[in-house]
Image (cartoon, rainbow, N blue to C red):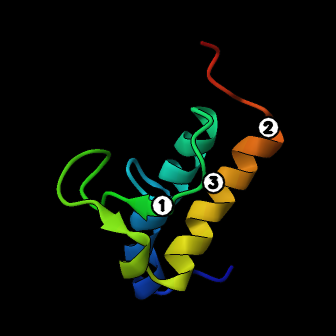
Amino acid sequence: MKTLGIDIKQKLPIMTGHGSPYDRGSADSYYRRGMNPHYYPMGTYNGDRVEEKDMTEAEIGAYNKGYADNEKDGDFKEW
């Protein structure tokens, strides 16, 4: 079985955990907000918000995937 390298393991929480680009993308879709890539490296609404201009292509891709996955699932906030 192949294992992930240490550099990839260190990036996984940034890409998928609370406040991550994926998490923020899915939340924006859930609340029917438009796409606006961003994330919070210290958790949702903790620490400084990282804006799209300061994100890597991989981080923007994770945000877009979170948004698209939620759109596909159709899981939206009912007001």
- Taking 5 as reference, is 51 above or below it? above
| Spatial CA span between label 2 and label 3 | 11 Å
Judging by the rendered image, the residue that carries numbered circle 2 is 73
- Taking 22 as reference, is 1 above or below it? below
Residue 20 visible to an observer of this rendering: yes
Q: Is residue 52 left or right of residue 78?
A: left
For the residue labelled by badge 3, is the local secondary structure a helix, a strand or a loop? helix
- Taking 56 as reference, is 52 above or below it? above
- Taking 78 as reference, is 13 above or below it? below
Q: Earlier in the sequence, mark 3 or mark 1?
A: 1
Query: Residue at the location (42% across, 62% down)?
Result: 38
Q: Earlier in the sequence, mark 2 or mark 3?
A: 3
- Packing grade of label 3 (10 A; few <14, some 14-19, many >=20) is many
Q: Earlier in the sequence, mark 2 or mark 1?
A: 1
Query: Residue at the location (73% across, 50% down)?
Result: 69
Query: Residue at the location (58% across, 80% down)?
Result: 3
Q: Amino acid at mark 1?
A: Pro
Judging by the rendered image, the residue that carries numbered circle 3 is 66
* Residue 21 - label: 1
* Residue 67 - label: none
Q: Amino acid at mark 2?
A: Asp
Q: Position of residue 68 (x, y in %)?
A: 73, 53
For the residue labelled by badge 1, is the local secondary structure a helix, a strand or a loop? helix
Residue 4 visible to an observer of this rendering: no
Do residues under tags 2 and 3 come within 8 Å of each other at their CB atoms?
no
Image quadrant holding the C terminus, namely top right
Image quadrant holding the N terminus, namely bottom right
Q: Quadrant of residue 75?
A: top right
Do residues under tags 3 and 1 come within 8 Å of each other at their CB atoms?
yes
